[in-house]
Image: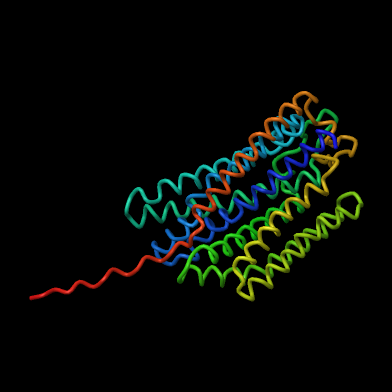
């Protein structure tokens, strides 16, 4: 396997890992107002992801950085084409991150309500916008022979990209609902499980349609079909497991579904990294967009040293914060003696 192909796989792993881990964060952030009827219940939902969300976002940073370092032509063309969309993603990430930090700073309903809404909006926008951007890689954007994007903002809103954006948003909601069912108790847990049952079958339909659409616009190949079928099968399994009440298995199935959806896109994208809708001769390919052999060798050594450290640290964090978020007990009644 060449280093160019290896780094394409690494980029795919980073983006897949991001949606597996940050996907349930997005889902919890988007659903915390619907699942939490009181401020206490909303804080329970937020506290379920409180120690984890910022670490999960690291996967997005390294995913973008890996493209920048390993495939500079891909980075330049894709990020310049989606400049405005990327700006919206950054704004959504900022207001989402600030919401976690500032929501509890002032003890008023208006203050907490404002930051709850920013958390909700940010958590909805990021997976939807990133899904559109990822879908555009495969369906194609107007790119000329100089690797320059020649379209406008509206050219980014392709039908396939919009479908993938909607699919990843619904999968994030489903993933977040199953996570809350696994991580909380009481009324929050019951509402999360009920919402997961409502979302499961629409999500399965969206993923099945996505799988068929993806195969239809990519090059032929049995392994591409298999890669696209995996998230569809996982979505069906998730719907059945959620209905039967298996919380741990349901969460694992939704993780495979959302991760498999992203992985299937990269599997069908190869050997391209970005498709040109103007002329297939203008497609950006793995070999054509890659950095020099020396740069890839240095990056590989760094990745071999640092990636296990990051994985061990993140795994340890999940282990430390593995306990359920329990509903605080009611304060004991005070007896007043006259």
Q: Nearer the viewer, residue 157 or 224?
A: 224
Q: Nearer the viewer, residue 300 or 243?
A: 300
Q: Looking at the image, is 223 positioned above or below residue 197? A: above
Which residue is rendered at x = 74% and y = 55% of the image?
A: 260
Q: How many marks?
A: 0
* The image quarter in which residue 177 lies: bottom right
For the C terminus, which image quadrant? bottom left
Residue 15 point in image, percent of width and height: 69, 45
Q: Nearer the viewer, residue 231 or 92?
A: 231
Which residue is rendered at x = 57% and y = 58% of the image?
A: 27
Q: Residue furthest left?
A: 338
Q: Nearer the viewer, residue 296 or 63?
A: 296
Residue 334 point in image, percent of width and height: 20, 71
Q: Is residue 165 left or right of residue 194?
A: right
Q: Looking at the image, is 97 positioned above or below residue 179? A: above
Which residue is rendered at x = 78% and y = 39% of the image?
A: 8
Residue 74 point in image, percent of width and height: 76, 34
Residue 57 point in image, percent of width and height: 58, 44
For the N terminus, which image quadrant? top right
Q: Is residue 214 left or right of residue 125?
A: right
**What sort of colour scheme is used for the picture?**
rainbow
């Amino acid at each position: 396997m060449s280093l160019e192909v290896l780094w394409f796989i690494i980029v795919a792993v980073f983006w897949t890992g991001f949606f597996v881990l940050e996907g349930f964060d997005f889902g919890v952030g988007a659903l915390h107002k619907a699942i939490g009827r009181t401020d206490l219940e909303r804080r329970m939902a937020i506290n379920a992801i409180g120690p984890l969300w910022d670490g999960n976002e690291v996967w997005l940073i390294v995913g973008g950085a890996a493209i920048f370092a390993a495939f500079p032509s891909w980075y330049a063309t894709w990020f310049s084409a989606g400049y405005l969309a990327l700006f919206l993603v950054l704004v959504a990430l900022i207001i989402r991150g600030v919401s976690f930090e500032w929501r509890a700073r002032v003890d008023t309903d208006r203050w907490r309500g404002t930051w709850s809404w920013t958390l909700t909006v940010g958590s909805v926008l990021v997976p939807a916008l990133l899904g559109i951007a990822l879908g555009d890689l495969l369906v194609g954007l107007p790119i000329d022979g100089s690797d320059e994007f020649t379209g406008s903002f509206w050219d980014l809103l392709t039908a396939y990209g919009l479908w993938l954006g909607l699919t990843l948003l619904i999968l994030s909601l489903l993933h977040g609902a199953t996570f809350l069912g696994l991580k909380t108790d009481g009324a929050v847990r019951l509402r999360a499980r009920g919402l997961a049952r409502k979302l499961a079958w629409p999500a399965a339909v969206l993923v099945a349609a996505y799988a068929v659409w993806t195969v239809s616009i990519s090059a032929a190949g049995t392994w591409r079909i298999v890669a696209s079928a995996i998230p569809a099968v996982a979505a069906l399994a998730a719907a059945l497991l959620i209905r039967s009440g298996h919380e741990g298995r349901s969460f694992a199935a939704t993780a495979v579904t959302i991760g498999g959806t992203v992985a299937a896109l990269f599997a069908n994208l190869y050997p391209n990294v970005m498709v040109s809708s103007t002329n297939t001769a203008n497609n950006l390919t793995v070999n054509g967009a890659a950095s020099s052999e020396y740069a890839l060798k240095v990056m590989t050594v760094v990745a071999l040293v640092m990636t296990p450290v990051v994985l061990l640290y993140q795994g340890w964090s999940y282990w430390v914060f593995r306990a359920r978020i329990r509903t605080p007990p009611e304060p004991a009644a005070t007896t007043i003696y006259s």
